[in-house]
Amino acid sequence: MAKKVIEIKGLNYSYPAGAEALKNINLDIYEGESLRIIGPNGAGKSTLLLHLNGILSGNSHIRVLDLEVEERNLPRIRSKVALVFQDPDDQLFMPTVFDDVAFGPVNMDLDKEKVRHLVKKALEAVGMQDALNRSSHHLSFGEKKRISIATVLSMEPEVLILDEPSSNLDPKARQHLIDLLKRFRLTKIIAGHDLELILEICDRVAVLDGGAIVADGDTKAILSNKSLMELHNLEVPLSLKLK
Amino acid sequence: MKHSFIDEYSDLDSLIHRLDPRVKLVTLVASLLFIISTRPTSFVTFVLYGILIFILIGLSKIPIGFIFKRSLVIIPFVLIIAIFIPFFKKGQVAGSYSFGSVHLTVTYEGLMVFWNVLVKAYLSILCMILLATSTKFSNLLKAFENMKCPKLMTMILSFMHRYIYVLVDEMMRMKRAKDSRTVGGKRWFHVKALSHMVGVLFIRAYERGERVYLAMCSRGFSGQIRTLQDFKLNKTDFCFLLTMAMLLIAIRTIRR
Ligand SMILES: Nc1ncnc2c1ncn2[C@@H]1O[C@H](COP(=O)(O)OP(=O)(O)OP(=O)(O)O)[C@@H](O)[C@H]1O
Ligand SMILES: [Mg+2]
């Protein structure tokens, strides 16, 4: 059995202003797995992801890479678990692409040469090595998305968490992203609605609705279960319907 | 959406663009000091400074028309402040005018101060525009930081520069959405809608701030933004610095 990377037991969370966003979540994620979290709008997907590197913390027990998620472990956890936000304008906050991609490594106290090397490698991995000195605000949306991924790749994480990576991308940019994600060997957790993308890269799916996990298992089995999908405002992907 | 007007010419490749931003900053401060401390009567000195600035602009390959246009934006403010000086300064009367019961007298001393303010302001403005258009904003900030400017200030400026585009976009999108749904209607209604939009924009900016902070925390932010800085002074930088220093001093001493 592969190593357990993330272990969530009995996670509840309510936003200070709102109702319960997560109810009794139990989830184990193993090394090298690609887990997809799907669910209708407002199901709590983004909220769940924010727990995985300790940005939010409910009253629960989460272990990440054998570390308890708590204040003193956060720096170690955050250098291993990379979270990419949904909106690239939130993810890219530095004036130039270089500074953005270097932000994580510099905070990890690596030396200059190492930082430069990591930045170069990360940008090459997403095919944007020419953008090194450009300003983030002059990039196209797809380019911003790719650089967002580079900003965490440069930290050499063990777990990659993406929130809706394919939203607003045109078909070509989307395909490029899929190819990119397929190539990465690390543990991936991806939230979003793009079901075709799941089929291509994810072997396991968890369905979240109303803050609770309602199904968890093999991708094809879950996605082709019509009644389950429709019950939770989702649909069976076209490519599975046609078979 | 395109916002290239903000740093339109900062990507050109010229001697001036290639200079280390710190060198440019130091040169700017030195030039300003020299210009400001010149005696108002040394006309030749001003002309020479002017020529020097235009040579630099020429070297930078930035269209001179662009720089003029930029300067036209700032000069009215100087004018508004300076225009009253000739009337208030006491001294030898150069002319007096009366409009009804209002008597205005212009003095030679006043005119001299006026000219002095105007020419110095204009030369300084040209210098600053040249620096601002020939340097990338991010590099300029790094230079400030490198020269021990308070971190907090450079951080605020950096976020401002990064997110002003995002906010402008958001405002434009909201305005379009509003325009495509309002057909006719009273002017008052439009004003009300606009005020709501400003409120929404404020809240969105606030929420974005929160999300950006979370994104920073996710990548190990611990209260201090650190960047890699590797400015290196090369031969050109030294030569430029020396040449400029010598020219400034030479112009100053030319007519004692
Ligand atoms: N900052 C917040 N304050 C209060 N309530 C919030 C906040 N963020 C989200 N919520 C609420 O928590 C619930 C879960 O939101 P979440 O963003 O996790 O959903 P999601 O599954 O990511 O949806 P989407 O597919 O639209 O991204 C929603 O009901 C939402 O209204
Ligand atoms: Mg979400």
Image (cartoon, coloured by chain):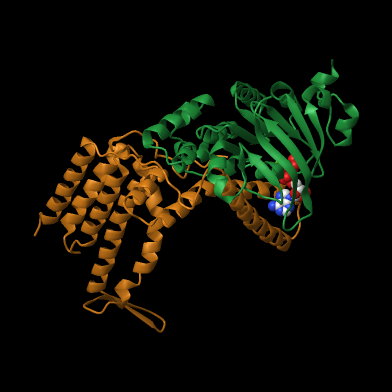
Give residue A7's position: percent from left, percent from top.
69, 38
**Is A243 placed above or below A211 here?**
above
Output the letter for the chain in green: A
In terms of depth relative to the viewer, which is nearer, B243 or A100? A100
Q: Is residue B222 left or right of residue A4?
A: left
Furthest residue in direction right, as rendered: A227
Q: Which color is chain B depicted in?
A: orange
Furthest residue in direction top, as rendered: A243
What residue sits 60% from the left and 31% below the top? A142
In terms of depth relative to the viewer, which is nearer, B136 or B133? B136
What residue sits 24% from the left and 53% below the top? B31
Locate the C terminus of chain A and report the quarter of the image it occupies: top right
In terms of depth relative to the viewer, which is nearer, B218 or A98? B218
In terms of depth relative to the viewer, which is nearer, B63 or A162? A162
Locate the N terminus of chain A and report the quarter of the image it occupies: top right
**Is B112 placed above or below A64 here?**
below
